[in-house]
Every structure is written in structure tokens, then in C-alpha cells.
Image: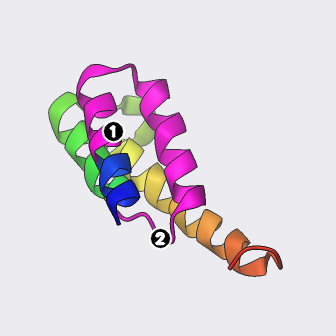
Amino acid sequence: MILRISAFILLLFSILFMPFWLSVVIALCAMIYFNVFWEAIVLFLLSDLLYGIPETKFFNMVFVSSIVILIVLIIIEAIKKKLKFYK
């Protein structure tokens, strides 16, 4: 439990103060390590609310990284269920 809270705080700090690519790497590692890391979606939603601008190549959507991280979380959880060595 302490490790999950620490990962949440680290991801929050990285979203607020670090480059975006570092936040993505930390979120991916946390999603692989923890069972259903919903906190990543909430924090990337916060990131989109703070720093997001409408992207014309994504049909003027602001919440691009939140949607992408949700899709990645669903894919990772599906892959984890298929692996035999993962709980």
C-alpha cells in the first residue's frame, strides 16, 4: 500500500515538474507493476487539464493523453491476464 501511494506521489511530481516523456515511462512501469493502476488515468487527466491544448490532428480534442493512457491500461491488463507467470 505504501509503495502504491509512493508511486502515485512520484507520478504526480513528475507530471507537475518533469518532462512529459518521464511521466509516461513512470506511468507505464506503475501500470505493469501494480494491479489496475487507475491513478495514472486521473493524473494524466490532471495533466491534460493543466497543459492540454486542442490538437487539430486529433479532431480538436484536449484529452488526448488521458484517452491514450486509458487504452494502454486496458491493453496492459489484458496482456497481464494472458501471461502465466503474472498473478
Nearer to the camera, 54 or 73: 73
Q: Is residue 62 above or below residue 16?
A: below
Q: Is residue 53 visible?
A: no
Nearer to the camera, 61 or 11: 11
Q: Report the side of 35 relative to 67 (left or right).
A: right
Residue bearing the label numbered 2: 36
Q: Report the side of 23 relative to 62 (left or right).
A: right
Crowding at dot 2, Cα within 10 Å, few <14 / some 14-19 / many 20+, comes out as: some
The quadrant in which residue 77 appears is: bottom right
Q: Is residue 22 above or below residue 25?
A: above
Q: Which residues are magenta?
A: 9-38
Crowding at dot 1, Cα within 10 Å, few <14 / some 14-19 / many 20+, comes out as: some
Q: Report the side of 30 relative to 50 (left or right).
A: right
Q: Does the magenta segment cover residue 39? A: no
Q: Looking at the image, which residue is at 63% across and 64% down?
A: 76
Q: Does the magenta segment cover residue 15? A: yes
Q: Looking at the image, which residue is at 73% across and 74% down?
A: 86
Q: x, y (%) of residue 30?
A: 50, 52
The quadrant in which residue 32 appears is: bottom right
Name the residue type under label 1: Leu
Q: Which mark is residue 10?
A: 1
State the count of labels.
Answer: 2
Question: What predominant SS class does the magenta segment belong to?
Answer: helix
